[in-house]
Amino acid sequence: MFLKDKSLHKNLSIVLGGVGIAQLIPFLFSFIIARLYSPEQFGIFGLLLSITGPLSVIVCLRYELAIALPKDENESLGLVKLGWIIAFLLSLISILAIFVYSLFVVDFQYSSLYFIVPPFIIFVAVGQTINYWLQRKEQFKKIAFLKIIQTSSISILTVLFGYFFLKDGLVLGYILGWLILAFVSFFILFRAKSFSQKASSNLVLLMKKYKDYPLYNAFPALLQAVCISIPLWIAQKYFSTNDVGFFNLTRQLLLVITGIGIPAFTQIYYQRSVAALHQNKEQFTEFKKFFSILLVLSVIAVIILFFFGNELFIILYGSNWSPSGKIASILIFSTSLQLIVFPLATVLNTIQKIKIASLWQILYFLSLITLYFFKFKSFNSFLKVYIVVESSMLIIYFLTIYLLVKKHDYSIVNKKHE
């Protein structure tokens, strides 16, 4: 039973504590930042996030997911280098694309914003690859430390730039926070003396060996990132600016829940599922442990926001934001399912069922796209349809993961008895 697993408790407490602090910092600073920047500046920043969000999942073409898998340390570090090289090439391509785009667009708005993208690609690649390498080493304290460094840097710099009335303070604070994360991450890796000596694997062979990640995981991961923005785009198309504003604030605060839980549980569950794979153990034991914990947390979140969401938003942001509390009481149902399903889905990487995960992601994307063809009578009706569609897809995904894990374990048991 998971209650007796001291190792699991220790790692979870470290990562959840670190990620919790990392998420709490920008949440607390948001009350100051909202008073330093105008809605227009937040709009421009939102444009940046709509670009960098999807890009951040494909900067290494998903090769970073394989870093924890090799038994050979040399091969693992080779994958780190491979991720950096790919990101550098993508960064050069983005520079060329922005330059070509600027030639054909007379009114090239937010040009400085677009040129933030190339360095962002490199910063994210360094941070992500080293994060997965630290997972491999079970260095969860360092992972938590890096996350706190990143969010603290972004929050503090954004406030400082806003205090000195810098127009692009939100954008500059964000990109410099990623730069600081990349620098500190690289310093941690560089201190591991084995890096320069061991990371000499044949990169072409590594690309071929782990080709399923870019072939079957990169595009679906990109779709998943795009899916986060689809409901907001639909809301902007059909409803008033006020409705979109209430919806956006609600989603931002719910991301605090998923932003703490999903990365933390994903990191630890992935490391433990890989360890079980190397030891030729059944996967369902770890699956059941994590499902039990995630289910309890999700139920607590649903109870709090469904019954007290309206009151919480009034206390935190004032009576003007009461509609956001009502929206939260609806959105929490799909959010709680995400908290359960997305961390558990990482086991599909371990048991080499990437194609299944890719297929589901495509179906998930298509299901959300169909909402564009609905004619909603009210914003509330849109929310209910959206929740039904997303929740249904998440339940299907969970059942698929469950069956695949059981099938994998069944094959292991059969091999042991042969």
Image (tube, rainbow, N blue to C red):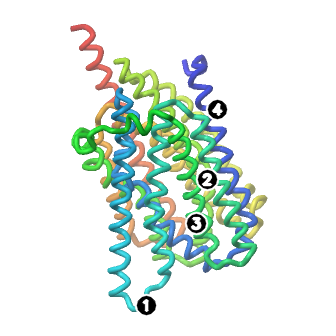
Residue 217 % position (x, y): 31, 48
The amino acid at mark 1 is Asp
Front disc: 3 or 2: 2
Q: Which residue is mark 4?
A: 13
Percent position of residue 105, x then y: 37, 87
Q: Which residue is mark 1?
A: 107
Front residue of 31 and 361: 31
From the image, state whether disc 1 or disc 3 is nearer to you.
1
Residue underneath mark 3 = 248
Task: Check if mark 1's residue and mark 3's residue have beta carbons within 8 Å.
Answer: no
Numbered disc 1: secondary structure: loop
Counting residues from the start of the chain, the first of labels 2 and 4 encountered is 4
Q: Amino acid at mark 4?
A: Ser
Task: Please indicate, yes or no, whether residue 78 appears anywhere in the rendered image.
Answer: yes
User: In the image, 382: left or right of 170?
Assistant: left
Which is more N-terminal, label 3 or label 1? 1
The amino acid at mark 2 is Gln
